[in-house]
Image: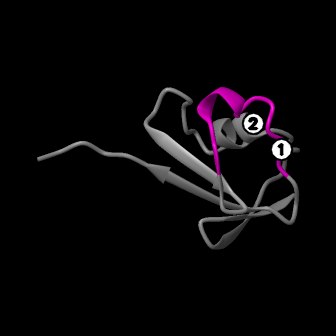
Amino acid sequence: MNLNINGQIKEFSEEIITLEDLLLNLNIKKLDRVAVEINRKIIEQSSFNETVVHLDDCIEIVSFVGGG
């Protein structure tokens, strides 16, 4: 399965169904400070496990890092 993530096409050997599946496959934990947008719509973290990912989706994933 190929997905457009942060402007790059990435290929996945296993089937990705939900946004949570995608994040786990990318080793991004749900508890990390992360924001996800699919087709310019921000997805609430509480909906990651029920949001279905489609081939034509444009996915943006942003991680927040603290510092000073």
Determine the residue positioned at 55% across, 39% down. 28
Q: Measured along the vertical axis of the image, is residue 7 above or below residue 18?
A: below
Q: Residue 54: where, in percent of width, then height?
A: 87, 55
Residue 22 occupies quadrant: top right
Quarter containing the N terminus: bottom right
Kindly identify the amino acid type of the residue bearing the numbered disc 1.
Answer: Ile
**Element type at mark 2:** helix
Circles 1 and 2: CB distance less than 8 Å?
A: yes
Q: Measured along the vertical axis of the image, is residue 14 above or below residue 3?
A: above
Which region of the structure is painted magenta? 42-53
Q: Measured along the vertical axis of the image, is residue 38 above or below residue 9?
A: above
Could you tell me how far apart the alpha carbons at marks 1 and 2 are, in whole angstroms? 6 Å
Name the residue at the left extreme.
68
User: Which is nearer the N-term, disc 1 or disc 2?
Assistant: 1
Residue wearing tag 1: 16
In the drawing, what numbered circle is on residue 28? none
Is residue 32 found left or right of 37 in the rendered image? left
Residue 50 occupies quadrant: top right
Q: Residues within 10 Å of mark 2 (few under 14, many from 20)?
A: many
Residue placed most toward the observer, 61 or 46: 46
In the drawing, what numbered circle is on residue 21? 2
Is residue 35 found left or right of 9 in the rendered image? left
Kindly identify the amino acid type of the residue bearing the numbered disc 2.
Answer: Asp
Any magenta on residue 29? no
Q: Residue 58: where, in percent of width, then height?
A: 73, 65
Residue placed most toward the observer, 47 or 54: 47
Q: Residues within 10 Å of mark 1 (few under 14, many from 20)?
A: many
Any magenta on residue 50? yes
Q: Residue 4: where, in percent of width, then height?
A: 72, 67
The colour scheme used here is one colour
Is residue 14 found left or right of 49 in the rendered image? right
